[in-house]
Amino acid sequence: MKRRKNPGLQEHFDNDPMASVASLFDIAMVFSVALMAAIVSYLDIEDLLFSEQFTVVKNPGESNMEIITRKDGQILRYQATENASGTSQGNGKRVGTAYQLESGEIIYLPD
């Protein structure tokens, strides 16, 4: 009694030359997603992507300082401006306190 051959995956790959290309594409997609996840965790930017509120200070203490905040899905940018004498003018209100650590890092705490 002869045993009948069961058509399986091997026979499918023999008939379809594009099957190996599709497998390579799947592997490349998995690799790229894993690479993006590794970069996000390495750079510690989960707060920027997933938190509701955050504050970033760019170029602290310099003339082109910029404060970027995200609150309730809206992103606001504040740029430091100075007049000719080097002091700011106008009316305003206190919105928080900034502290400079010994390492030079500046931390802003909103009121």
Image (cartoon, helix red, strand yellow):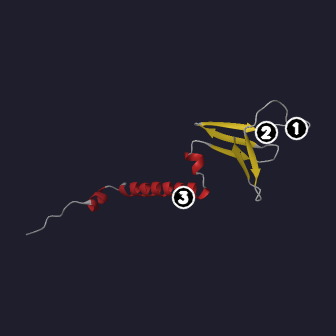
Q: Residue at x 78, y 32 (%)?
A: 92
Q: Secondary structure at mark 2?
A: loop
State the residue lying farthest toward the right: 85
Amino acid under label 1?
Thr
Tell me residue 75's x, y (percent).
63, 37
Amino acid under label 2?
Ala
Q: Residue at x 66, y 44 (%)?
A: 55
Query: Could you tell me how far apart the alpha carbons at marks 3 and 1 are, in whole angstroms?
Result: 44 Å
As rendered, which of 10 and 32 lies closer to the eye?
Answer: 32
First in sequence: mark 1 or mark 2? 2
Q: Are marks 3 and 2 in contact (CB under 8 Å)?
A: no
Tell me residue 65's x, y (percent).
77, 43
Q: Are marks 1 and 2 in contact (CB under 8 Å)?
A: no
Q: Residue at x 14, y 64 (%)?
A: 4
Q: Secondary structure at mark 3?
A: helix
State the residue lying farthest toward the top: 91
Tell me residue 71's x, y (percent).
61, 38
Query: Could you tell me how far apart the alpha carbons at marks 1 and 2 are, in whole angstroms?
Result: 11 Å
Q: Is residue 62 left or right of residue 70?
A: right
As rendered, which of 4 and 28 lies closer to the eye?
Answer: 28
Q: Secondary structure at mark 1?
A: loop
Q: Is residue 103 left or right of residue 13?
A: right
Query: Could you tell me how far apart the alpha carbons at marks 3 and 2 are, in whole angstroms?
Result: 35 Å
Label 3 neighbourhood size at 10 Å, few (<14), some (14-19), many (20+)? Answer: few
Q: Which mark is residue 87?
A: 1
Q: Which mark is residue 38?
A: 3
Give the labeled residue for mark 2.
80
